[in-house]
Image (cartoon, rainbow, N blue to C red):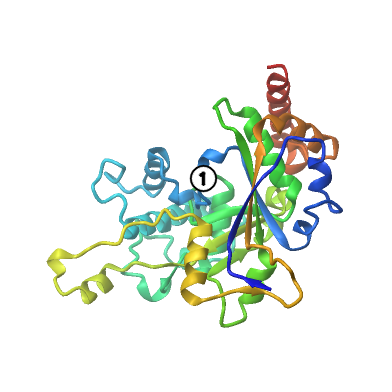
Amino acid sequence: MTTSKVLKEVWIEDNDTFFIDFSPTGKYSFLFERYIFRGERTEKFEKLLPTSLRENDASINNLYGYAKISGMNTSHSQHKFESFYQLAELNVLMNFYKAANDKGLNLPDTSFFRKHSLEMFLSIDILKCEIGDIWLPNDFLELAALAQHYGLPTRLIDWSKDIYTSLYFASSGALHSQDDSQYLVLYALDYLTIEFLKNTNDRIPLRLVVPEQSKNPNLNYQKGILSAWEYRTVYMSDLIKESNKPQELEMPLVSYKSLDVLIQEYVDEKNISWGGVGVQEQEPLIYKFYIPIKMAPQIYDYLVKIGYGADRLFTGFEGIATMLKDNMAYYNKKSQ
């Protein structure tokens, strides 16, 4: 039986079977075979979005600020133009590359940024022949993965090959939070189906990025993988050519659609399905598990006992300090 259903939501009950169900021999053992994971501290985030596409004012202002685009923020009438977002993301990566390269840090071999590292500001339209039609370009993904890991906004979404790593980030995040969230969230993405379809006519335009983990110990410890949807690069010159009235040019706005929505719309448009004969119910591409937030202390305690604390997932003193902060949050939450 085949399917074209992308997302399945599952509400987990607060009971003693959670750790059995999410084990290599439990109810959800199939997740260990073909899925990558993402943990979030609250259901309030609602959407699977890259860091550069977060819809709150602070995230938008940070994007333009890191790019050093003067005067562009949420008060500007054009701040939601896709072309300006892409311009900002390009220059965030350029600024990151130049500063890191000047310090002699170990960077991915990205010839584009090395070639343009003496320029004050990069224009997408001027560099059209080098950038191409897909945003982000494939050649930028490795550098973007590194920048993303250190907190800069990109079009990438963080995942992990390790379910317990993702449960750590969800549960520890919930412990540190003081809002009225009801659930923490665990996403699971079927990467094997995405990779299998990549070499067929039913390819889904979602790229999975496995960074060079030797250049980033934290990513290595966390078994990090990143996803990048193929957005269309927006060029002003193309928009002008395609418009009958350049003076009334309509600029495309940035899309804040969740990743599961983007995939669902694409597979519906292209009539794509997956699965096989003999399977009674084919699994979706993405699971979204809602886990009662009151289980966060219990989950965190379990993870620490099996060796999945911050001292394992972060390097050196950062891991130790983060572990102590997590432990304090755990005891504070447990005593409430």
Quadrant housing residue 171: top right
Question: Measuring 38% from the left and 76% from the top, which residue is drawn there?
Answer: 129
Question: Measuring 65% from the left and 33% from the top, which residue is drawn there?
Answer: 293
Quadrant housing residue 60: top left
Residue 104 seen by the camera: no
Which residue of the protein is positioned furthest toward the bottom in this rendering?
A: 201
Residue 264 seen by the camera: yes
Residue 234 percent coordinates (x, y): 34, 67
Residue 123 percent coordinates (x, y): 33, 63
SS label for mark 1: loop
Neighbourhood count class around disc 1 (C-alpha, 10 Å): few under 14, some 14–19, many 20 upward? few
Question: Measuring 52% from the left and 64% from the top, which residue is drawn there?
Answer: 263
Image quadrant in which the C terminus is located: top right
* Circle 1 residue: 46
Residue 92 percent coordinates (x, y): 43, 52
Say above or below: 72 vs 35: above
Q: Give 271 or 43, whichever is nearer the viewer.
A: 271
